[in-house]
Image (cartoon, rainbow, N blue to C red):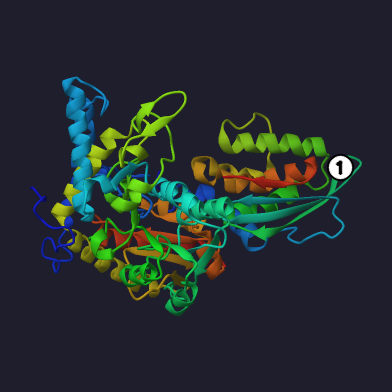
Amino acid sequence: MNMNEVPAGAVRGDGGDAADLSAHAADFPILSRPVRGKRLAYLDNAATTQKPEVVIEAERRFYRESNANIHRGVHWLSQHATDLYEGARERVRSFLNAARVEEIVFTRGTTESINLVAQSWARNTLQPGDEILITAMEHHSNIVPWQFVCEQTGAVLKVVPINDAGELVLEAFDELLGPRTRLLAITEVSNALGTVNAVAPLIRRARAVGARVLVDGAQAVAHMPVDVRALGCDFYAFSGHKLYGPTGIGVLYARHELLQAMPPWQGGGSMIETVSFERSTFAPAPQRFEAGTPHIAGAVALATAIDYVLEVGLERIGAHEHALLEKATAAVQALPGVRIIGTAAHKAGVLSLVVDGIHPHDLGTILDADGVAIRAGHHCAMPVMTRYGIPGTARASFALYNNDEDVDALVRAIRKAQDMFGGRR
Amino acid sequence: MSGHEGFGDLRELYQEVIFDHNRQPRNFHSMADADHVAEGHNPLCGDQLTVYLKVADGVVQDVSFVGHGCAISTASASLMTEAVKGRPVDEVEALFRDFHALLTDAPPEGRDFGKLEVLAGVREFPARVKCATLAWHTLHNALEGGGTAKTE
């Protein structure tokens, strides 16, 4: 199925048919393997998603039929690999609805994408006293790179607080956004709380005061259509592996005029124009930001993953996951001693919870014994845990292949943990 | 793998002694006149504890801990305080080495671990070894002169 003609952001499939993705679970070979002798209920999708057969096969096929280094060979296979790699870039451009293919940089993942912006753009742009505005629900990868920049430039980090439900306090956003704000760096979906931020109006307000905006899309791209031109952001970062693609490949979208003006941040092969011992000149973007041999097979397989989710339909995926989230939320709320962390009005498929008297790590181990894979801990969002006064949570997160049986297994295993811990008091 | 009660291997990990020591940790208090103190931290799961010691004539005269963590780390810390109190420091260090081996590879022959044996079930759960050893690493650091122990 050729999705090239479908404009990004358009409703794909019939969005109302929320529950009927069951046939797609069979696309994921790993889901049929037992874990600890039990049926696997994989609910750790916010950490990484499983890979459909087409993605696994795309990477395998690249190495079997197309492998060569890119942008440097005169031989046929090198040109072929280059075409596939650059074709993948075009698929990403279309997926994000970016205006130009040169606005797409391949990276190792969201973390590297954000670090690229921090070290290439922010470090060379910000002055002492300039402000970087982030939010209290950011992943460490959208906090620490800015702390580096603040140390390097004398800029100041400001943080928009969240309320008890895990939503941004918008009044505080308006107060913190000011003439010194040079950058707003904000997540579209919180990995720890599931909160979906309505980023478009915040981007407009930030740009109105002259700030640039980076959107962390790591938790968004697999759950909702993204259109960087409709958002109006300057930078958008995401990882392939949370989008049913391989690990080690990610994307930075950067507005063309910004990217063209940004200096390289890593030196090496592929990113140069000419090199002498006196001076080197650099290739235009995006090659300037892709030093060394990139994860070629990863980029090619990421393009296949994009084709796959577009074929299933992002609107349908989002609706399906939301139905599972609602079912799971109602079921765990009915259990005594369970507290949900993150109760925003608008959430993606993340259910973070704590259980009275059971440490999240113990809960994770007990669930694992029943084949229920969740994440236990701080989810690389320690400030969020501090905000709620807890060491961590147990987090179930949903993907297109999850179903009611997974939710039932989750709830059953939580009850078992309560039985083990609580029943003996 | 799966036992008749439906808890399977879990019962090896979460034995009654673990629940008991998690609910009512022994020697769970700070010690104002301690002569050795160290803090332990497991950044991955947020476990945090402080171990206090009084050592005289090369013997652990008294030991206590405070902090918070999962059932495995709390119970292990509690059991550790019971196991090392009154023992010579070199025996304590040897016990740490053997205990670590018990949790990670082959248990040393001929060693009687006493109650610590209940933690052997951790071996089947490699992700939890750090929980069971955090208190011991911290104790070791306290004996070596303080500092922060980290397991992850």
Q: Position of residue A122 (x, y in %)?
A: 46, 53
Q: Is A280 above or below relative to A252? A: above
Q: Chain of mark 1?
A: B
Furthest-right residue in this view: B57
**Which one is in front, A195 or B88?**
A195
For badge 1, the amino acid type reads Val
Q: Quadrant of residue A248?
A: top left
The residue carrying mark 1 is B59
Query: Which residue is rendered at x = 21% and y = 66% of the image?
Result: A319
Q: Is A25 above or below relative to A19? A: above
Q: Quadrant of residue A105?
A: top left
Q: Is A115 above or below relative to A290? A: below
Left or right: residue A36 compared with residue B12: left
Q: Quadrant of residue B49?
A: bottom right
**Which one is in front, B148 or B67?**
B148
| Residue B133 in sight | yes
| Residue A25 in sight | no
